[in-house]
Amino acid sequence: MSLDLSISTLWQPSQWSADAAGRKNLALLVQLRWVAIAGQVATILAVHFVMGIHLPIAPMLLVAAIAVIMNGLSFGTLRKRTDVSHAELFLSLLFDVLLLTAQLYLSGGATNPFISLYLLQVALGAVLLDRRSVWGIVFVSALCAGLLALHYRPLDLSGPLEGRLFDLHIVGTWICFTMIAVLLVLFVAPVTRNLQARESYLARLRQQAAEEEHIVRMGLLASGAAHELGTPLSQLAVVLGDWRHMPEISGHPALAEEVEEMQAAVGRCKQIVTGILLSSGEARGEAPVVTNVRDFVDEISSSWRAANPGMPLRCDFGPHDYPRIIADPVIRQAIGNLLDNAREAGATYIDLLVGRDSNSLNIAVRDNGSGFTEQMLEDFGKPYRSSKGKEGHGLGLFLVVNVVRKLGGSVSASNGADGGALILLRLPLSTVAIEEEGTHVG
């Protein structure tokens, strides 16, 4: 399996970019208004020319034309805006109530069975609006319906339809009931889904805020621990240096080798402490290191192999031109965490895959360990979700996800076709690269 295929088939772009429920709901109202306009025009023409009931055609078509203009303006709003407020939805529904009132006034007022269409506006308001706004729609609808019982233009029933107002009312009531039922199913259900999507988005935001607060607390704890460990590690390094030059040890090869290993271990601990302080924003006296992708990844791999002898780690670079990047310690730690997790999950070999596309640097860690369960994939990136079966573990992946998210990137996880796990980091070039399109080949 090639590097590019393994990475591109894993990653799926995010389907939610912003809370646009209001915009989606206004789009549904625009569609509903088109249906209402078409229904009104068809009904007006059929009643006037087919049934022979004389209606004021010009005023009623003028009201429909006003609705068309309003819908055009609403469509323009949808093209320019990413979200729509409750106040705008309220005004849109209020406009529909007033247009319906105008049409009913011209066609029999309260005697027109289509007066029940007020209930559709109220139902939409109950789903879309806050409590005060929906009660406003209820009040205006009830007021208009009451006024139509007193003031309206009577229907002109002459000829064969004279005296059959009740029969026409029964038929019209059935047609109106059917229309309301169909429109509620067609439009209220999508509106409800939009609102549910908004609530899910807000819940994810709250979860993200809680996780970031957790990260801050852990960062403060790690920074404090690093400060506390710095002094004893430095003292231990001095003592080991003195021991190495003592005749009793320098003349004993086995002891000298053990002291050298202890010095290497202390040096490794000091590097870790320094990395923690750098990641927390401290010890910034050193200038940021600018390097190329291959050197950066090779350095991480060499350091990890030295700390984990006997564990095969293979690096595979895709045939791309890579930009120069800033060797950010947090990225180094994130990759190191993924390698450590793969080893602790029982892997006997690990692949470190590197590639890129037009927007991001892609780094994947693939292993042949135990992989993820379905529940772990659903909870991926949440704290204390571990594949190692130990209570309290799982912070490594949690930290990786949050570090990459802070850089504007994303992390995805899956199980390989032949077993094991594959975790992909997508780091935006706009964040990590020195130049947008590099000329250096990794």
Image (cartoon, rainbow, N blue to C red):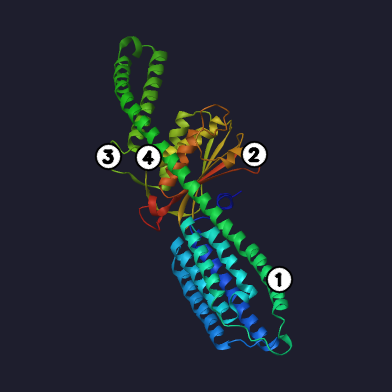
Mark in front: 1 vs 3? 1
**SS of the residue under disc 4:** helix
The alpha-carbon separation of the residues under discs 4 and 3 comes to 12 Å
- State the residue in front, 310 or 60: 60
Q: Residues within 10 Å of mark 1 (few under 14, many from 20)?
A: few
Instruction: Identify the residue position indicated by label 4 in the image.
Output: 329
The alpha-carbon separation of the residues under discs 1 and 3 comes to 80 Å
The alpha-carbon separation of the residues under discs 4 and 1 comes to 71 Å
The alpha-carbon separation of the residues under discs 4 and 2 comes to 31 Å
- Image position, residue 294 (x, y; %): 43, 46
Label 3 vs 2, first from the N-terminus: 3
Instruction: Identify the residue position indicated by label 1 in the image.
Output: 174
**In which quarter of the view is residue 56 placed?**
bottom right
Instruction: Identify the residue position indicated by label 2 in the image.
Output: 419
Label 1 vs 2, first from the N-terminus: 1
> Measured along the vertical axis of the image, is residue 319 above or below residue 175?
above
Q: Residues within 10 Å of mark 4 (few under 14, many from 20)?
A: some
Horizontal side of 327 relative to 305 (left or right) equals left
The alpha-carbon separation of the residues under discs 1 and 2 comes to 61 Å
Q: Amino acid at mark 2?
A: Gly
Q: Residue at x 34, y 9 (%)?
A: 248
Q: Amino acid at mark 3?
A: Glu
- State the residue in front, 394 or 18: 18
Q: Amino acid at mark 4?
A: Pro
- State the residue in front, 187 or 254: 187
Outermost residue, bottom side = 159
Horizontal side of 119 relative to 266 (left or right) equals right
- Image position, residue 326 (x, y; %): 36, 47
Label 4 vs 3, first from the N-terminus: 3
Instruction: Identify the residue position indicated by label 3 in the image.
Output: 286
